[in-house]
Image: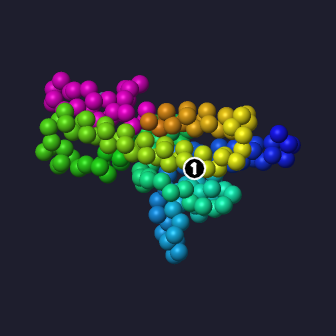
């Protein structure tokens, strides 16, 4: 490999790595900008990169082509996201649950069915996001050698964060001995 292509692939892997976290957490939403054409990741919050008004595009960095893939506007939780808030994971899960189904609807559904449907819904959301981000990575590294160490490290990080993203929406589902309802908090929420 020439030194130039070596540098290019390193640079590309590092760029993607810097965007990966927000891509997995926020995914894409329709851009509300006036041209309305681009699908963009929700605005970065100042927490992560410090540029409040920046939109990250889920696109090919060479061609600016937008990666067309189904996605959700769900915001997921990763441990590095907000370590100072001990309730961040619970809050993220609560929001996803409320967006899907109201307490009233829950009362009208047999409890076991409700919990199964909730778990399947959350699984679907997270899988959709992971596949979208995976397609974005594939598109952006396709012209580089997959043997390249930085690209392999990017892929490993993608796998690790994807697993964490999926574990973050697993629910406890234990049955409460007094009320008979299933617990819809995150798995291992007592830890
Ligand atoms: Zn529980």
Give the answer, above or below, for where 105 lies relative to 120: below
Image location (x, y in percent) of residue 164: 49, 34
Magenta region, residue range: 167-191
The stretch drawn in magenta includes residue 3: no
The residue indicated by pointer 1 is 136
| Quarter of the image that includes the N terminus | top right
Image color mode: rainbow
User: In percent of the image, x 22 and y 31: which residue is there?
Assistant: 182
Image location (x, y in percent) of residue 42: 51, 58
Image location (x, y in percent) of residue 133: 53, 47
Q: Is residue 150 visible?
A: no
Q: Secondary structure at mark 1?
A: helix
Callout 1 crowding tier (Cα within 10 Å): few <14, some 14–19, many ≥20: many
| Quarter of the image that includes the C terminus | top left
Q: Is residue 53 visible?
A: yes
Give the answer, above or below, for where 121 lies relative to 178: below
Q: Nearer the viewer, residue 49 or 118?
A: 118
User: In percent of the image, x 59 and y 57: which residue is there?
Assistant: 59
């Amino acid at each position: 490999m020439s030194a130039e292509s070596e540098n290019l692939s390193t640079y590309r892997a590092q760029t993607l790595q810097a965007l990966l976290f927000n891509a997995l957490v926020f995914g894409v939403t329709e851009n509300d900008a006036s041209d309305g054409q681009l699908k963009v990741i929700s605005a970065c919050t100042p927490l992560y990169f410090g540029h409040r008004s920046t939109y990250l595009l889920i696109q090919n960095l060479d061609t600016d082509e937008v990666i067309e893939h189904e996605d959700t506007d769900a915001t997921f939780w990763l441990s590095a996201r907000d370590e100072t808030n001990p309730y961040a994971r619970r809050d993220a899960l609560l929001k996803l649950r409320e967006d899907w189904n109201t307490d009233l609807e829950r009362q009208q559904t047999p409890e076991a069915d409700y919990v199964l449907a909730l778990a399947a819904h959350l699984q679907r959301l997270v899988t959709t996001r992971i596949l979208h981000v995976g397609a974005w990575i594939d598109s952006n590294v396709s012209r580089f050698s997959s043997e390249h160490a930085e690209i392999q490290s990017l892929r490993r990080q993608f796998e690790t964060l994807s697993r964490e993203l999926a574990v973050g929406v697993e629910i406890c589902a234990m049955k409460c001995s007094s009320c008979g309802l299933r617990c819809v908090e995150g798995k291992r929420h007592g830890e």
